[in-house]
């Protein structure tokens, strides 16, 4: 009997642990958010400021040591020594600050801080020697990000040995509870030498005088640059209250190129240079600050107090390590005459809301309680909206991803009505028999595709609205739609580009010669994609699988120019391609970005000239990047290819900040894995569609931002929106990727709703009691039966039977609990979703066991590896 009780006790504990796992994911998320806030207040992590990140990398935690500012508009500083003597490089920053308490933070590098105290009032200064700003964080402004391969050099013989953190506390109403603040930043440092070294160029006026009542006063700064080339990637402006706008330029051969332009009344953080600018020997760097003396009764001079003014334009740059200089200044106007030709924009003030003025500088003013409450509510609303920008996207599980009857999906686009347009191959398949060694199509005998290859769907429910493209194409590939609703498509078998009207059966324009591959102005070789400039109508074609170029045509199809070349051995250089596979236009910046597929990167070029601007490349892309798409407003979407054998980067979608190239979010399907995502497109509401050439499917992903934003705007429906968010989160955790059974799905959603409305306690109690009661009844029944049949020997056999049951739970060894083995022993149990995904080819349908690469899309066994020239 004692053995029976022990077994029951063990089972009780097992089921208790199982039942305790049925918790609301939303409640866990809430607890996580609450915990993170309390962590900041309690200064957790400050006892371990240096954390090893491997053999050569480490993290340095720089935090305020638990401070409580006594009055608004307080600046506090603290210092941390570099924990190593030899040279190191700062390559990334992670801020720890709340917009409720901190207005902005600056991180300086120097050799001697102004004080040796734990912290001090920054009025005493930051550093006794020359200081260099390394990082800036401000409310409502983007954090500083360094490009890949760029680092600030610290330590050693030339780098600074101390970091000084300056924190500006604006309105201290958040400190009414007397809590201690531990805001700061964590640095990622490495001992690995960086090929590019970051530095700071400060342009500063020192003699400007602003007469009282003067409406417009210009402060101009200009210097000739006399060093090795530098590349500019961020800028910061700074004045006090009288500043209206600050602008910085590079002047070369009389041409003014904008570096950055901003209102100094907005958060004074570093902003990314929208169009990366390089500065060479003998260029001129010029800056202008525009002030107004209105409201002042005396002259205003340059100085450090709040009643003085400043005119600073900071430029963050990088240089080759062998030529690097970490800090440069310009405090004169070497060529006043050139400012006669400064662009007019430099004198146009940037409007700033009144409440933003107060939040930006943090100058404390007495206001009525109602005004304070209004400002706090407005600040809270803005904070929530900013937080919403860090959105995530998840699969829209109601989208009929597998119900659409499609061939190989090669292209996606959205028409002017925001309908989804799909370009697919019907019953044609790209396989190893499709082309010969000279890229001539070998399956012309099949004739063109007899199905409609262009499908127009309702983006909400996938209802077919319109279709066309029957008997026109052999192997569809790229698709885009211009502002007039015309379809632009490519066919890799025909080696042509087509323009079709939405209701036309015949093409309006054809580029290339049918079935004839080539490399001159009139021929393509397996063209992959096409993009049309919405402003000029210029046509851009990526050509392609067997050419490595981008070709520009006039709106009526006349050749204009081309750029690009085949990738050379070793590292791919700018402007080189290994299958330019996908195009996206960025009209906001007059750029064209290309998914350079086999080089696993995105390259962006200037539309007017084809000049290389920059590269976006991440390790998580893997070796292949299939498609890229831009969403006006600054978001870039992309999908990569399956990993090569032995590599770990998963196939997934990416959301990036276009200005910085930083990955904001990644996404994958829930119901079925990506197999070979081939194209991606996003709508204005951040709904994302991905077409998969191998799975012959189109996935839909929705932004969770929309739901959060509704909760901000409609306070009266907050509870309902929280329930919806909780349902989505729990559905994601509980959804079985392999299940397509609607009744089971409805049942799970029903359980989720119960959990979110308070029935979770009853559910836990039921799950806790019922198994124990049932098991107890079974064991009592078995004991009674065996006692009746075997007499005294029944007790021994019952213990043996219960031991076998517990043995199944403990595993073969009986030494530990192994629920995996227990469930795996039951019929119908599947480990799908936990097994390693099969590796597919790069752009070709292949057998699942095959791991070799290919340049084609097929369903038959793969051919031998294609030549690298493709």
Image: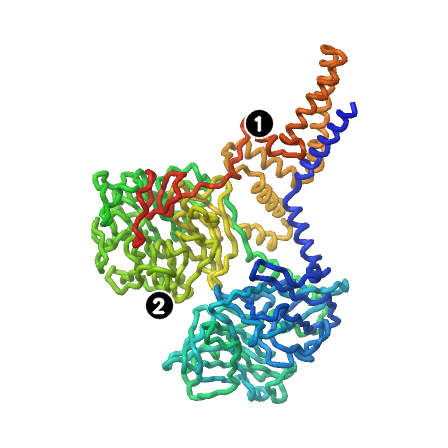
Q: Which residue is mark 2?
A: 611
- Horizontal side of residue 366 vs 85, given as left or right: right
Expressed as whole percent of the image width and height from the top left, the position of residue 159 reads: 57, 74
Above or below, 812 relative to 782: below
**Among the two numbered marks 2 and 1 on one chain, the one whose residue lies closer to the N terminus:** 2
Above or below, 170 relative to 492: below
- Please state which of residues 573 and 295 is positioned toward the viewer in this rendering: 573
Q: Which residue is mark 1?
A: 826
Query: Dot 1 lies on which element?
Result: loop
- Horizontal side of residue 778 vs 452, given as left or right: right
* Alpha carbon distance from label 2 to label 1: 62 Å
Q: Residue 308 lies in what quarter of the image?
A: bottom right
Which mark's residue is nearer the viewer, 2 or 1?
1
- Please state which of residues 455 and 277 is positioned toward the viewer in this rendering: 277
**Residue 842 can be seen in this image:** yes
Q: Residues within 10 Å of mark 2 (few under 14, many from 20)?
A: some
Query: Dot 2 lies on which element?
Result: loop
**Residue 167 can be seen in this image:** no
Expressed as whole percent of the image width and height from the top left, the position of residue 434 reads: 26, 43
Expressed as whole percent of the image width and height from the top left, the position of residue 462 reads: 43, 42
Q: Residues within 10 Å of mark 1 (few under 14, many from 20)?
A: few
Q: Residue 743 lies in what quarter of the image?
A: top right
Q: Residue 130 lies in what quarter of the image?
A: bottom right
Expressed as whole percent of the image width and height from the top left, the position of residue 301 reads: 60, 87
Q: Tell me what residue is drawn at x 68 percent, y 28 percent.
A: 806
> Where the N terminus falls, by quadrant?
top right
């Amino acid at each position: 009997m004692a053995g029976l009780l022990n077994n029951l006790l063990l089972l009780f504990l097992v089921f208790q642990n199982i039942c305790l796992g049925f918790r609301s994911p939303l409640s866990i998320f809430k607890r996580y958010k609450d915990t993170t806030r309390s962590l900041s207040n309690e200064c957790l992590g400050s006892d371990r400021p240096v954390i090893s990140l491997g053999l050569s990398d480490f993290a340095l935690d720089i935090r305020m040591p638990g401070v409580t500012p006594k009055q608004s508009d307080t600046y506090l500083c603290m210092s941390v020594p570099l924990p190593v003597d030899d040279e190191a490089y700062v390559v990334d920053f992670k801020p720890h600050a709340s917009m409720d308490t901190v207005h902005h933070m600056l991180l300086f590098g120097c050799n001697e801080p102004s004080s040796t105290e734990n912290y001090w009032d920054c009025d005493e200064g930051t550093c006794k020697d020359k200081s260099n700003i390394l990082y800036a964080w401000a409310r409502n402004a983007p954090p500083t990000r360094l490009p890949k391969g760029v680092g600030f050099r610290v330590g050693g013989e030339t780098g600074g040995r101390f970091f000084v953190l300056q924190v500006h506390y604006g309105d201290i109403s958040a400190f009414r509870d007397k809590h201690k603040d531990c805001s700061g930043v964590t640095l990622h440092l490495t001992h690995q030498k960086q090929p590019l070294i970051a530095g700071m160029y400060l342009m500063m006026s020192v003699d400007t005088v602003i007469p009282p009542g003067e409406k417009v006063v210009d402060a101009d700064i200009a210097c000739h640059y006399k060093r090795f080339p530098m590349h500019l990637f961020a800028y910061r402006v700074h004045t006090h209250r009288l500043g209206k706008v600050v602008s910085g330029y590079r002047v070369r051969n009389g041409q003014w190129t904008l570096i950055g332009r901003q209102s100094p009344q907005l958060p004074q953080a570093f902003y990314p240079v929208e169009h990366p600018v390089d500065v060479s020997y003998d260029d001129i760097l010029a800056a202008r600050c525009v002030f107004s003396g209105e409201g002042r009764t005396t002259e205003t001079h340059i100085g450090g107090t709040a009643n003085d003014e400043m005119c600073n334009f900071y430029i963050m740059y990088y240089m080759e390590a062998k030529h690097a200089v970490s800090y440069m200044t310009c405090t004169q106007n070497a060529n006043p005459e050139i400012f006669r030709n400064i662009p007019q924009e430099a004198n146009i003030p940037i409007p700033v809301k009144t409440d933003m003025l107060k939040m930006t500088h943090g100058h404390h003013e007495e206001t009525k309680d109602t005004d304070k409450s209004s400002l706090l509510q407005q600040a809270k609303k803005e904070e929530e909206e900013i937080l919403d920008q860090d959105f995530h996207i998840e699969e829209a599980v109601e989208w009929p991803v597998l119900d659409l009857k499609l061939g190989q999906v090669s292209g996606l686009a959205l028409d002017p009505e925001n309908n989804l347009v799909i370009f697919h191959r019907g019953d044609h398949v790209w396989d190893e028999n499709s082309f010969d060694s000279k890229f001539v199509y070998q399956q012309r005998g099949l004739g063109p595709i007899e199905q409609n290859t262009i499908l127009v769907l309702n983006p909400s429910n996938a209802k077919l609205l319109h279709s066309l493209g029957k008997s026109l194409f052999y192997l569809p590939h790229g698709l885009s739609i211009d502002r007039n609703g015309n379809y632009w498509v490519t066919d890799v078998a025909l080696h042509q580009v087509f323009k079709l009207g939405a209701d036309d059966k015949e093409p309006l324009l054809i580029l290339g010669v049918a079935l004839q591959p080539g490399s001159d102005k009139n021929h393509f070789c397996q063209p992959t994609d096409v993009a049309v400039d919405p402003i000029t109508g210029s046509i851009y074609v990526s050509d392609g699988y067997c050419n490595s170029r981008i070709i520009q045509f006039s709106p009526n199809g006349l050749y204009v120019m081309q750029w690009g070349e085949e990738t050379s051995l070793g590292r791919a250089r700018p402007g080189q391609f290994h299958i330019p596979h996908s195009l996206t236009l960025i009209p906001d910046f007059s750029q064209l970005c290309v998914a350079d597929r086999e080089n696993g990167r995105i390259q962006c070029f200037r539309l007017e000239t084809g000049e290389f601007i920059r590269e976006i490349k991440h390790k998580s892309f893997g070796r292949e990047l299939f498609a890229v798409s831009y969403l006006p407003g600054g978001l870039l979407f992309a999908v990569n290819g399956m990993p090569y054998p032995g590599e770990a980067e998963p196939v997934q979608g990416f959301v990036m900040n276009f200005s910085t190239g930083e990955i904001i979010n990644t996404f994958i399907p829930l119901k079925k894995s990506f197999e070979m995502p081939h194209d991606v497109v996003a709508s204005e509401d951040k709904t994302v569609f991905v077409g998969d050439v191998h799975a012959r499917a189109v996935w839909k992903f929705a932004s969770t931002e929309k739901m959060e934003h509704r909760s901000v705007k409609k306070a009266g429906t907050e509870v309902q929106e929280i329930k919806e968010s909780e349902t989505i989160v729990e559905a994601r955790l509980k959804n079985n990727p392999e299940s397509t059974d609607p009744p089971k799905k409805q049942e799970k959603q029903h359980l989720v709703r119960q959990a979110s409305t308070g029935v979770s306690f009853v559910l836990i109690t039921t799950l806790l009691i019922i198994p124990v009661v049932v098991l107890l009844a079974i064991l009592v029944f078995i004991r009674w039966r065996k006692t009746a049949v075997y007499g005294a020997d029944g007790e021994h056999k019952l213990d043996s039977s219960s031991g076998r049951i517990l043995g199944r739970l403990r595993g073969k060894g009986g030494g530990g609990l192994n629920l995996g083995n227990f469930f795996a022993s039951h019929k119908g149990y599947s480990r799908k979703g936990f097994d390693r995904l099969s590796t597919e080819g790069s752009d070709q349908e292949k057998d699942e066991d095959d791991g070799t690469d290919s340049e084609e899309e097929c369903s038959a066994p793969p051919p031998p590896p294609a030549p690298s020239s493709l």
